[in-house]
Image (tube, helix red, strand yellow):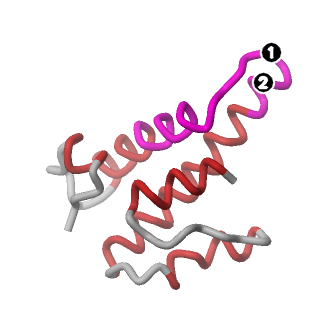
């Protein structure tokens, strides 16, 4: 839950509350963001799942410990790589990404 709180603060949106996978898949639709930012949020949610699952597996099987801050930093990094290489907006800077000043 702390990871999603930190993501909400980073993206400057209302707190992310979801009770199911379906809620998470639809949360971007109710974020109050513009269409471009909604697509980015949807991607960040997916990257978030991946990073949380990866941290869970590394904790479980390799005895590594992860803080919520570390997971969010991983989400920001992987999200930036995804966005800057897979979207039509390839000129986004890291500084704009980490401050979520994309629009």
Q: Tell me where the magenta segment starts and ends, as one range.
A: 56-77
At 51% from the left and 83% from the top, the residue drawn is 29
Whether residue 26 appears in magenta in the rendering, the answer is no
Q: Position of residue 88 (x, y in %)?
A: 24, 61
Q: Quadrant of the C terminus?
A: bottom left
Secondary structure mostly seen in magenta is helix
Circle 2 sits on which residue? 59
Q: Are marks 1 and 2 in contact (CB under 8 Å)?
A: yes
At 61% from the left and 48% from the top, the residue drawn is 3
Q: Secondary structure at mark 2?
A: helix
Using the image as rendered, state which of residue 88 and residue 7 is in the foreground: 7
Q: What residue occupies the far right of the structure in this picture?
A: 60
Looking at the rendering, which quadrant does residue 32 occupy? Answer: bottom left
**Above or below — where is 22 with respect to 10?**
below
At 78% from the left and 72% from the top, the residue drawn is 19
20 relative to 1 in the view: left or right: right
43 relative to 11 in the view: left or right: right
Looking at the rendering, which quadrant does residue 101 occupy? Answer: bottom left
Using the image as rendered, state which of residue 103 and residue 36 is in the foreground: 103
Q: Position of residue 62 (x, y in %)?
A: 79, 15
Q: How many marks?
A: 2
Circle 1 sits on which residue? 63
Q: Residues within 10 Å of mark 1 (few under 14, many from 20)?
A: few
Q: Position of residue 33 (x, y in %)?
A: 37, 79
């Amino acid at each position: 839950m702390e990871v999603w709180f930190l993501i909400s603060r980073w993206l400057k949106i209302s707190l992310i509350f979801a009770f199911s996978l379906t809620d998470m898949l639809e949360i971007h639709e109710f974020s109050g963001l513009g269409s471009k930012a909604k697509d980015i949020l949807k991607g960040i949610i997916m990257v978030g799942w991946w990073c949380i699952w990866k941290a869970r597996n590394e904790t479980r099987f390799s005895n590594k410990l992860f803080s919520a801050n570390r997971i969010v930093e991983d989400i920001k990094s992987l999200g930036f790589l995804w966005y800057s290489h897979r979207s039509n907006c390839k000129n986004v800077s890291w500084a704009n990404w980490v401050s979520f000043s994309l629009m």
